[in-house]
Image (cartoon, grey):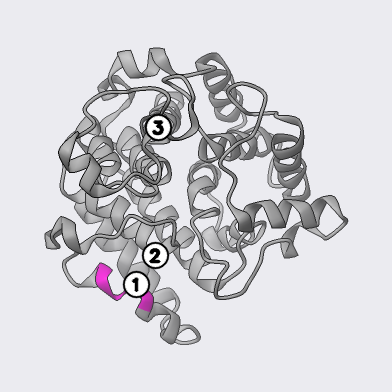
Amino acid sequence: MLRKIKGAVFGFAVGDALGVPMEFKSRQERAKVPICDMVGFGTYNQPEGTWSDDTSMTLATMDSLKYGIDYENIMKNFKKWMYEGYFTPYGTAFDIGMATKEAIGRYRNGTPALICGGNGEMDNGNGSLMRILPAALYDFYKGENIENIKNFSSLTHRHIRSIMACMLYTDFIIHILKGKSIENAFENAVKFLFAYYKNEESKELANYNRLIKNLKNLSENEIKSTGYVVDTIEAAFWCLLNTSDYSSCVLKAVNLGGDTDTIAAIAGGAAGLYYGIENIPEKWIKKLAKKDLIDKICCGFAESF
């Protein structure tokens, strides 16, 4: 179990760190100078191995879940991260999405955890999807009903579209943990999503129609790599479906340009889980900032099961 958890979380953090220097760079730039290794500086002028809010919020969630599900406690960890620098590489939070920042601000001002997330049309960035991996692992190992994913997402993103993406990714991760192939896990997760929401949210499901229209065979030009939650999950799955090893998956994600850290992290978490931590290049893991903290939180999380 611990190796599975470490594969997922280190796979996530490495993907994040690979993407941080390239965030917001265009695909055209990446086509001219493709990324083939971990580098530093770039967008945020951070040394190589630096991970961003994606990994910070993932670690903050894991740190809380080792005591069981307590949404108020998770939000307390998010507040400590944003305002006090906990769960960060170097003591300062950076690259925080607006919806996430506003939700944590609401919590700080006394709003109950489960209604902190925005629920408007414009509140559909990838900020809850990027931190949902620990909840997926928790639900599998604890045998929990994944309906609680709605609450996990709602801490920062309450719109049904964001919740759908989190439910989809969670079900996909659970199928990977059950030993399914990436393609089979993807097919099953998409079927689950469309069956689960077929009645009350059929209009919203239309946003995910490309998932049932042969996503794998879309050209790179047809894949958008923005921070919009639908674009993000499409891009992550496209990278997973079109590669056959960890390194190729995360590098393909980074070379899409755009929201590189989040797309590479989401794809990398699943790829690290599927291919195993032993298939994540050791040189990349060694370069990670605070890798001992990541390891410690993984161990504490695993010990809770």
> Regarding mark 1 in the picture, which secondary structure is present there?
helix
Quadrant including the C terminus: top right
What kind of residue is marked 2? Answer: Val
Q: Is residue 143 left or right of residue 69?
A: left
Kindly report the distance in space between the C-alpha atoms of the residues bearing marks 3 and 2.
23 Å
Q: Is residue 98 above or below residue 142?
A: below
Task: Tell which of 181 and 21 is nearer to you.
Answer: 21
Which residue appears at 62% of the width and 40% of the height?
61
> Contact, CB < 8 Å: mark 2 with mark 1?
yes
Occupied quadrant, residue 158 = bottom right
Mark in the foreground, 2 or 1? 2
Occupied quadrant, residue 57 = top right
Occupied quadrant, residue 225 = bottom left
> Regarding mark 2 in the picture, which secondary structure is present there?
helix
Q: Which mark is residue 21?
A: 3
User: Is the residue marked by circle 1 packed among few (<14), some (14-19), or many (20+) residues within 10 Å?
Assistant: some
Quadrant including the N terminus: top left
What kind of residue is marked 3? Answer: Pro
